[in-house]
Image: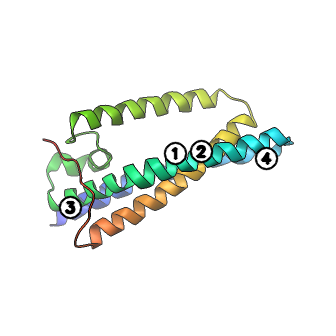
Amino acid sequence: MVIGTLGALWGTGGILLIVGYAAIRLTYPASEAFTYDFQWYHWGLLAANTAVVIYAKAYRGFQKGLSPRIAARVRYLRENPTLPRVALAPLFCLGYFHIARRKQISIVTLTVVMVVLILLVRLLGQPWRGIIDLGIVAGLAWGFITILFYTAKALTSKDFDYPPLIAK
């Protein structure tokens, strides 16, 4: 199924572009923080923030939740392509449509919360913004890698134990 394979590639590639672009875009403000003379509390906040983001966003958010679901939906899309799913493959694979209503609401809510947090962090001055952005860059890099890992596993394994949570 050529259209299914194209949809799977578009879905995976589109999501990786979003995550990768966000990580690259935040790298400069994150690195700019190091032009300031850090005090002990800056280093403490940097370590604590990075640890919390890696655990909460990268490990629990991406590795245990989002990345396997994306991979399962990429696999499902490859095997069950439709024109709307293929055309909007990144959105389908993220779970914005054809997913249980409760899950869809939580995905949209999380998206809105993330946008609000991004706008609020932009208001912070350096080095505070950079300290927060560094944790986010680490989390996004982890997420990028886990999306690649789970998607490769989903597309090459005979069995993939994660459900795509498809709803009509």
| SS at mark 3 in the image | helix
The N terminus: image quadrant = bottom left
Indicate which label's residue lies in the foreground, 1 or 4. 1
Question: Going by the image, does 72 lie left or right of 120?
Answer: left
The C terminus: image quadrant = top left
Give the residue at mark 2.
52
Amino acid carrying mark 4 in the image: Phe
Residue at horizontal 64 percent and vertical 47 percent from the top: 50
Answer few, some or many: residues within 10 Å of disc 1's Cα (few below 14, many 20 plus, some between 14 and 19). Answer: some
Amino acid carrying mark 1 in the image: Ala
Give the residue at mark 1.
56
Residue 61 visible in this rendered orientation of the protein: yes
Between disc 3 and disc 2, whose residue precedes?
Answer: 2
Amino acid carrying mark 3 in the image: Arg
* Marker disc for residue 34: 4
Figure colour scheme: rainbow
Residue at horizontal 63 percent and vertical 42 percent from the top: 133
Q: Locate residue 33: give its quadrant.
A: top right
Q: Residue 141 placed where, x, y %?
A: 54, 55
